[in-house]
Amino acid sequence: MDQRHLSHKDTVNLGSFYTPEWLVDIVYDLIRKHVPAHDTYYILDTSCGYGGFLRGDKAIGADIDKKAIETARSTLPNYTYFQHNSLFDISRSKYRLDKNAKMIIVGNPPYNDTTSIIRSDIKQVKFDRDADIYSRDLGISFLMSYDKLEADYVCVLHPLSYLIKKANFEALWQFRNHYKLTDAVVFSSGVFSATSKTTSFPIIIAFYERNNAGMDYQYIQDYKFKTQDGKEFSINQFDSIGHYVSKYPNHKAVSEEDTVAYFYTMRDINALKRTATFLTKENYNAVRVTEQKLPYYCYVDVFKDFIPHIPYYFGNSDIMIDDAGFKEMADLFMARSLQKHPNLKFPGRTKTYNDQDKQIEGYFRHLLGVHYVD
Ligand SMILES: C[S@@+](CC[C@H](N)C(=O)[O-])C[C@H]1O[C@@H](n2cnc3c(N)ncnc32)[C@H](O)[C@@H]1O
């Protein structure tokens, strides 16, 4: 079921990328596995579109989009529907659920960064949100709304970056204080046909249990994420470049005299895919590179060439490094980087190595192990 009734503009505005059924099946597999008597629970999707996530006897769907709710009502008439803004005036009574009703929230809320500059001309959010769930990202607001509704379980799709990026995780605030991730499957955003294929990012089907201890960032870093294609990874299995160099503008810490090169800000692997590495002059996004740290920046410059060998599920992760392995061959990384940027004046390095590229490839194969994409 595609969001046929919407123009491209409204699809982006509302984050209306409807979910294929095989992903909904995974949601229900997780629910069956962890909630034995799940049929005694209300199923609620507060951003239900055509109702693709609604199943069982007691399902409730809501959406801000009138036409979507009309379609859901006519194709799945046995469920209860509300056409409203689910992020405003949030309460159980909005769904005619009382305090004691047992409830599981499912769905695929919109994930729009409302301040994003990409296509900002059409990303105008035209509805209000309760102040206590406000976030620059709509999807984060939706997660916070599930906490306000005090769902017993939440099993929804959302970008993995909400959990693994520390600033996002902190922004989840009450949600992370009251819910614990207990099971998850990661897949690629590329499965949504209407979204960009060139920069696929990881999406998680996350199963959360309400629990007063919640979870902290360490828990997420240690968490073993499973992917839909049978891989397993955790965020702390790699060392990251941020432990060795500045990833962001550092002109307050490094003087102009100590600067031998400039490098573009490093956000994550997907960002590096799109941005420059070495810059010829300083700008607002430039990081100052000292002679001592230069090899690490050459490393990142070469890392960029190997991004095609890195799977989508690391797209929002930091640039990873095996520092000991890198140190053994730092000269090779520098040589390769120098060849890429002949007009950069790296102090004292001109050597080239015969089997440089083979050795560098070997480094990345070793670094990524089973995750290396051939
Ligand atoms: C990613 S789609 C998911 C639709 C459906 N759950 C599915 O996966 O097929 C997100 C839905 O959220 C709805 N939406 C966006 N903002 C909303 C809001 N503030 N309140 C209720 N629904 C909203 C959109 O209209 C859209 O149908």
Image (cartoon, rainbow, N blue to C red):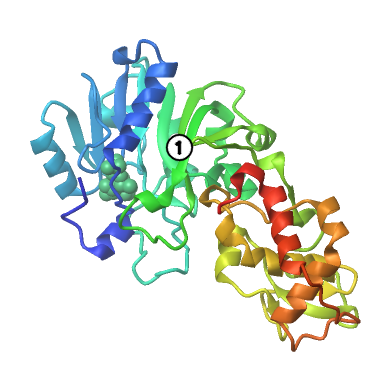
User: Could you say which quadrant of the image residue 338 lies in?
Assistant: bottom right
Query: Which residue is identified by label 1?
Result: 228
Q: Identify which amino acid the numbered label 1 is placed on.
A: Gln
Residue 109 horizontal side relative to residue 174, left or right? left
The residue depicted at 71 percent of the width and 86 percent of the height is 280
Image location of residue 316, percent across then percent down = 57, 53
Image location of residue 6, percent across then percent down = 20, 58
| Residue 282 vs residue 268, the one in the foreground | 268
Image location of residue 60, percent across then percent down = 24, 29
Quarter that holds the N terminus: top left
Quarter that holds the C terminus: bottom right
Asked if residue 301 is positioned above or below residue 188 in the image, the reply reads below
The residue depicted at 36 percent of the width and 72 percent of the height is 121
User: Could you say which quadrant of the image residue 146 lies in?
Assistant: top left
Asked if residue 203 is positioned above or below residue 244 in the image, the reply reads above
Residue 250 makes an appearance in the image: no
The residue furthest left is 74
